Structures are given as C-alpha cells and as structure tokens.
Image (cartoon, rainbow, N blue to C red):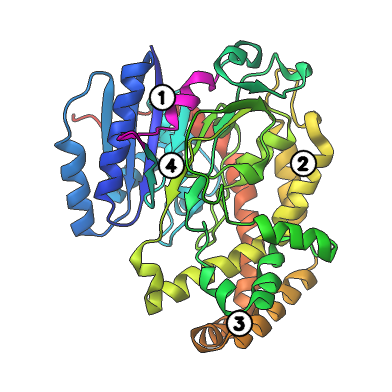
Amino acid sequence: MRKICLTLPTNRACAETISAVLEEAAYAAEHFDVEVHLLILDSSDEPALTEHAKVAHESPTVPNVIVHHLGEAEQREFLQRVIHHAGVAKPELVLELMLPSDLSYGACTNRAFLIGAALGCESIHRRDSDILYQVVNDAPVFPIHHELMSIGKRASDAVDGVDETTLDPNHAHKPVTMVGSSFVGEMSVDIGEMYRLDRDAYYDVVSLWAPGHWSDERKRELVDESFRGAGSEAFTHDHSTLTIVDPMRVDMSNIAFHQVQEWVPLPPATDTIGSDYFLIHLVHDAALPGVLHNRHLVNFYTPERRTGPGFIAYQMRFVKFFLSMLYFNFVYDRMAEAGESLLDDRDQVRIPAITEFVRESTLLDRAENIQRLDTIDRSYRKLGGKYAEFADIVASRRERLLDEAQQDNNDFALLIEAWAPMIHASRTTQLQRQPG
C-alpha cells in the first residue's frame, strides 16, 4: 500500500475546509489502495489553532487515514532537526526561509514536501484554506479521484485511466509527475473591484506580469485569461487528459506532484502571491507528463481581505508578484529553451541547471521593475481613494521592494542547493521527536 500526503496549509480560521478535506482523505482511502496522511500545517492564531486541532483530533477514525495537525512550534522543531542532519550551509537562514515570520506561499508548501518525505509519501496533494468542493447530486466532487488514477504511474500505463491523450509517444516512458485542475468562483486574485472601477487601469496593472518586450496584443490576451481559472464552468461530468499540462490551466489549490517536489523546492519569497507556481512551469518546460482534469474547486474570498489592513497587505503581495516576474520570466524563458535537456538520462531534473538560471536572473537590470513601479503608481493614483493611499505606501518602500525582489531569488538559489540534502535527511527524520 503506497502512502500519499494530502496537505492543507493555513494561517486563518478554516474549520469548514478542514472538515471537507477530511472527507476527501476518507474518499481516497476508501476508493484507492493508499494510506492517506492528511497534513494540516497551521500558522493560525491561538483561537483558530485550537478550533482546528479539535476538528482534526475529534474526526471519526477512518481506516488508512492518519491526521497530522502541526502548529508552527512542531513544524520548527522538525525543521531544526532536518537542517541539522542535512549539514546545510547557513542553517539559520535556511530555517528562516522554510518557516519565515511573514506569509510565504512557497515556504508552507516546501514544509509539506519535507514532511511528506519524512512520512514516506510518494506524492503530495495540496489544497488551500479558501476553497470548497463543488457538489453534484449532494456529493462533493473530489479532485483526488483523478490524482490517484494517474500520479506516479508510467504515462503509458496511465492511458487507461484518462478520457483523452494528447501526449507525444516519446514521453510515454516517463512518470506522470503532476495532476491538476483549476477553480471556479471568484478570481484567484482580489482585483474585481479594480476591473469595475477602471478597465484601462486594470489592463495596465495586470499586464505587468508579462515580460516587458511582449506586444500589446499578446499582453491583452494574457490579461483576458489571468486569474480567472475555469470561470463559472460548473462540473457536470468527468474529463481528464494525459498531456504536457499548460501552467495557465491549473491552480496550486488543486494540484498533486510526484518526485519533482523532491528535486526542486518552491521559491520561499514572503508576501508574494504566485511564488508557489514554479514547479508547474518546471514540469511543463521539462516535458514531464501530467494529467489535466475538470474537477475544479470553488474559490472564495476571506473577509479580512476587504478590511483596511487586509487590503494593504493583499495589494502589497500583488505588487511583489509583479516585481518577482522580472526574474521568473527570465528563468521560465531559459527553462523553455532548455526543454527536455533539463532532464538527465533517468528523466530527473538537472538541478544545477535550475540553480544556474535562478542565479543568472539576479544579475538582471532593474529598469523593467522600475517601470513596473511607475505604472503601479500611475494606475493606483488614477483609481483614487484607498488605491491612491496604497500608492503612497509603495512609493515610500520603492527601493526596499526592488532590493527584496532581487534578494528573494538569491535566497531561492540557496534553498535549491540545500534541497537534496534536506530531502535525504527528512527521509530518516521522525515527524515527532520520540521521548527519551
């Protein structure tokens, strides 16, 4: 019986989502020959942490489902032992990159990758705290169904479990490395109000995640499909495709990885949306097989985003995302150019190549990012009100933001170099320290 890790990182109250993911874990154990380790990585405040622990520990016992609810203290203790055993350079910095004091989408998922290795899990299946499942005929539509039909299988063996195949036969010997889908409901980024207030400002801002040299037409196409997932496409019947998965068609709240998460970590940048999407691009550019299915999750917004401090915090993550794209667009272009040469003769990622691309990116001229900040300043002031007030905050942090975007990729390169020893150490490190 193989072990899998179904993980839910959270920093907010989400008892309803935890209960729903518990149901998905039970579904997986009932319908597939797997031992499911449900891993809740909890950075919530004390009231929410206590509520989540109660939901996790008082859930009905289900055969082959093991629930792990870890607060930050337990996570830190595990990481300290792994980092010590791995003998990495700059251990204190690596610990900070793995468990920063500020929010990091990549770091929370990296912790799941290491703990999944410690638990002996062959695949990682990630959900988010601001999602729910579609319901058809009073039954939730669980993505893990398609994930377990294919993840880890040789692509040629996964054909019978999908509805369609567009994969080049040259890739049939490789394992299915990623299975994913998207979301319906509200946009993945909370910018609907910006769209309603001023379409031109919305276009100018959202187009900033494209490389600066792209044509206006190409940027317009990107803006039109950005952050919208599957729109309002309600689930009616299953459809899955064995393919090289387009990164624009999947979301990190609805994803499963095999092997690749043990080769390369996610960028550990703090307060930066989109920092957890790197592996989706790597899988695509290295021509590793995947499955795209249509069991989309339902995305919703949590109330704190609409508060004054919540608005500022979220918009800052949005700005930092645009600044990160100077570096990631470069890396993605280099990976796309390298293609299958990113893989060695065992179809494993050549890690030094990825490290080299990331380090090269940190040498880029900042002029494009300066232009991004100019556009953000102009567009947000045009929107007025709280957006103009936010523009003042960005202006006051301008140089710091530029420095942070560059340093984030230096930190990412360091973590890539430390990753293999940390994965190896995790495999021999017990999740809970034993007494005595």
Left or right of 360, for residue 418: left
For disc 2, the marked residue is: 335
Three-letter residue code for mark 4: Arg
Amino acid under disc 1:
Ile
Which mark is on residue 380? 3
Mark 1 lies on a secondary structure that is: strand
Quadrant showing the C terminus: top left
Mark 2 to mark 1 CA distance (whole Å): 29 Å
Q: Which residue, given by chain and number where applicable, does mark 1 sit on?
A: 4
Q: Earlier in the sequence, mark 1 or mark 4?
A: 1
Q: How many marks?
A: 4
What is the C-alpha distance between the residues marked 2 and 4?
Answer: 25 Å
Q: Quadrant of residue 169?
A: top right
Q: Please tell me which residue is depicted at 28% across the width and 34% down the height of the picture.
A: 22
For marks 4 and 3 on the same chain, the one whose residue lies earlier in the sequence = 4
Q: Residues within 10 Å of mark 4 (few under 14, many from 20)?
A: many
